[in-house]
Amino acid sequence: MAYVVGVGLLVLVLVGVPLQYAAGKPAVVQVVGPIHGFLYIVYLVSVADLVRRFRLGLGQVFALVAAGFVPLLAFVVERWMTRQITGGRQVITADGATPASGRP
């Protein structure tokens, strides 16, 4: 979700806003803006689930929330949180199994 929201925000900021103000063509903002807003809400639900599952601290939650409305931050925070959650180890799925072995 972080990548989807991050790409949507980049399109909005780097393409839509310049077209709206420099060329007087608000079409990209009118289409991408609401889509990004909806996807940001879905992203926040994903963040809430992540916070619940891994009991993240306030700073981590703040970074995750900010990632949806600060351009490029979504990509940095997603990578940072992935490393923190996995701890440099193999990923463990929600049911406790490792993808390679299929058992805890």
Image (cartoon, rainbow, N blue to C red):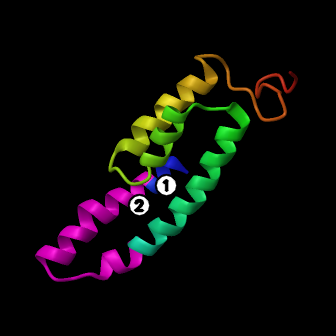
Residue plotted at (44% across, 52% down): 68
Look at the picture and state if 50 lies above or below 100: below
Which SS class for mark 2?
Answer: helix
**Position of residue 12 measured from the top left corner of the image (x, y, whole percent):** 32, 65
Q: Is residue 7 magenta?
A: yes
- Total labels: the figure holds 2
Look at the picture and state if 79 lies above or below 62: above
Disc ID at residue 4: 1
According to the picture, the residue beneath numbered tag 2 turns out to be 8
Which SS class for mark 1?
Answer: helix
Q: Is 82 positioned to the left or the right of 55 in the image? A: left
Look at the picture and state if 31 lies above or below 57: below
Q: Is 79 positioned to the left or the right of 72 in the image? A: right
Residue plotted at (45% across, 36% down): 77
Residue nearer the viewer, 83 or 44: 44
**Position of residue 71 measured from the top left corner of the image (x, y, whole percent):** 32, 50
Which residues, given as a range, are shown in magenta?
Answer: 6-32
Q: Mark 2: which amino acid?
A: Gly
Q: Is residue 64 magenta?
A: no
User: For the stretch drawn in magenta, what is the main secondary structure?
Assistant: helix
**Position of residue 46 measured from the top left corner of the image (x, y, whole percent):** 63, 50
Callouts 1 and 2 close, C-beta under 8 Å: yes
